[in-house]
Image: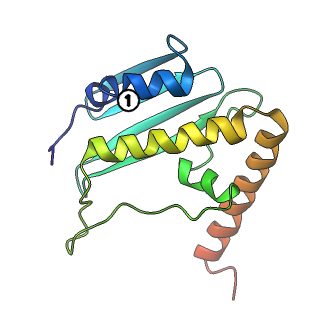
Amino acid sequence: MIRNPDVPVLLDHERALLDSIFGEGEYQIESSHPQEAAIRFSRFKLALGYDARDGSIASTLTLTEPWGEELDDPQGWARFLGEEPASPPRNSLGQVTLGPEEQIRAELKLVARLSRDIFSDPQKTRDAVNFVRGYRTAYNEWARGAWS
């Protein structure tokens, strides 16, 4: 497993997958730190960051206008499609056992599906945004103990 991976370099290795998702030349990879990167596309921005504490790749997806807000990690969007997102496998110490490159590839495959099945249609995007907002609100209320 790579320790302290260079996320922009790992994304660069996934150019073929990125081109198939977004279209060649239709996205930009931005980075200000080797362990973080963002992919900018006309409909959203996907930010990826390596967490050295547990070896995980964390991600957030921010929609562009008219939404312009960060709505959880891409896993929350999978719930809109009726899927329960799988967490990466961990060892007994809580460390993710998949390498960063495998985690990034899995995130990109999920984003490909979201882009195709949700974000390509404005009405589905609107419905998904409302679903993810509601799910996040309900989860946060439950976590604070508001539900008895």
Q: Is residue 95 above or below residue 52?
A: below
Question: Which residue bears the numbered disc 1?
Answer: 37
39 up-or-down from 147: above or below? above
What residue is drawn where x is 69% and y is 79%? 146
Q: Residue at x 54, y 54 (%)?
A: 75
Q: Residue furthest right?
A: 123
Q: Is residue 61 visible?
A: no
Kind of element beneath mark 1 = strand
Image quarter for residue 17? top left
Direction from residue 11 to residue 116 in the image, left or right:
right
Q: Residue at x 31, y 26 (%)?
A: 8
Instruction: Where is residue 40? Give x, y as percent.
Output: 52, 23
- Point out the image quarter for the C terminus: bottom right
**Residue 129 shows in the view:** yes
Q: How many marks?
A: 1
Q: Is residue 62 left or right of residue 93?
A: right
Q: Is residue 40 left or right of residue 118?
A: left
- Which three-letter amino acid code belongs to the residue tagged 1? Ala
Q: Residues within 10 Å of mark 1 (few under 14, many from 20)?
A: many
